[in-house]
Amino acid sequence: MSQGSAAWLPLFLAAALAALTWWLNHATTIADKQDNGGFSHTPDYYLDNFSATAFDANGQPLHVLRARHMVHYMDDDTTSLTEPHYEQHGAAGPMVRVQARRGAVSGNGDHVHFLDDVRLSREADNGGALELRTAYLHVIPDAQQMQTNKPLEVRLGESTLSASGMHADGKRRIMTFTGRVRGTYHVSR
C-alpha cells in the first residue's frame, strides 16, 4: 500500500460511517410515518354539549356522561372531553357524580379517565354527602368501579380522610384506601 492511499483510508471510513448514520436515521423516520396505519392523530368529528346515557334492560338509566366539548380521534378510537360530568345510577345505592376539567374515553367506551380538579360526590345513607377530591380518577362504568393512584381527600360531614390512592367497588359497596392514609373522625353529640 502506498503512502498516499494510506492517508485517504481514515477519510473514507469517516465518510462511510456518516453515510450509514444518515441512512439509519432516514429509515427509522420513514417507519414512524408509516406505523400509524395511515391515520394521523387529528379529530374526525367533535360535538358541543355532548350527552350519552346507558340504560338497563328495564329502560332505567345506568350512567350518564356529559361534556361541554367532545373530540373523537380515528387513529386510536379515543375521545377527549372538556368539562366532563358523570352520573352513576343504580339500585345498589345512591347516585354517584363525578366532574373534572378534562376527560378521556377509551375506544370501546369501557374506561373513562377524569383529569384535573376531579370531584366526586355521593349521597350518604344518613343524608349527608361524601365528597372526594383528587387529580385523577379512572372509572369503569359497567363494573361500577373507580380508582386512583393519586393523592386524594375525602370529606363526610366534619370527618376527613386523606390517602395516596383508592379503589371503589360500587357493586360490593367497598372503598379501599392505600398508601399514607390519615383521617379525622368527628363524633356528633
Image (cartoon, rainbow, N blue to C red):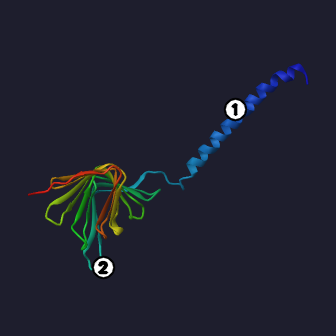
Q: How packed is label 2: few (under 14 Cα within 10 Å), some, or many (20 or more)? A: few
Q: Secondary structure at mark 1?
A: helix
Between residue 113 and residue 137, name the one nearer to us.
137
Residue shown at 81% from the left, 24% from the top: 8
Q: Which residue is mark 2?
A: 57
| Identity of the residue drawn at 32% across and 67% down | 144
Q: Which is more toward the observer, 30 or 97?
A: 97
Give me the disc on residue 18. 1
Q: Amino acid at mark 2?
A: Ala
Tag 2, which secondary structure? loop
In the picture provided, is 126 more to the left or to the right than 82?
Answer: left
Q: Residue at x 25, y 75 (%)?
A: 60
Q: CA distance from mark 2 to mark 1?
A: 67 Å
Q: Would you identify the image quadrant in which residue 166 lies?
A: bottom left
Q: Residue at x 85, y 23 (%)?
A: 6
Whether residue 81 appears in this view of the structure is: yes
The answer to which of 75 and 131 lies nearer the viewer is: 131
Quadrant of the rendering where the C terminus is positioned: bottom left
Instruction: Give percent across and percent down for residue 168.
Output: 32, 62
Q: How many marks?
A: 2
The answer to which quarter of the image holds residue 167 is: bottom left
Q: Residues within 10 Å of mark 1 (few under 14, many from 20)?
A: few
Looking at the picture, which amino acid does disc 1 mark?
Ala
Quadrant where the N terminus lies? top right
Tag 2–tag 1 contact (CB < 8 Å): no
Q: Position of residue 136 (x, y in %)?
A: 33, 51
Q: Position of residue 179 (x, y in %)?
A: 36, 51
Whichever of callouts 2 and 1 sits on the residue coming sooner in the sequence is: 1
Outermost residue, bottom direction? 58
Front tag of 2 and 1? 2
Q: x and y percent of residue 155 in the render?
A: 20, 53
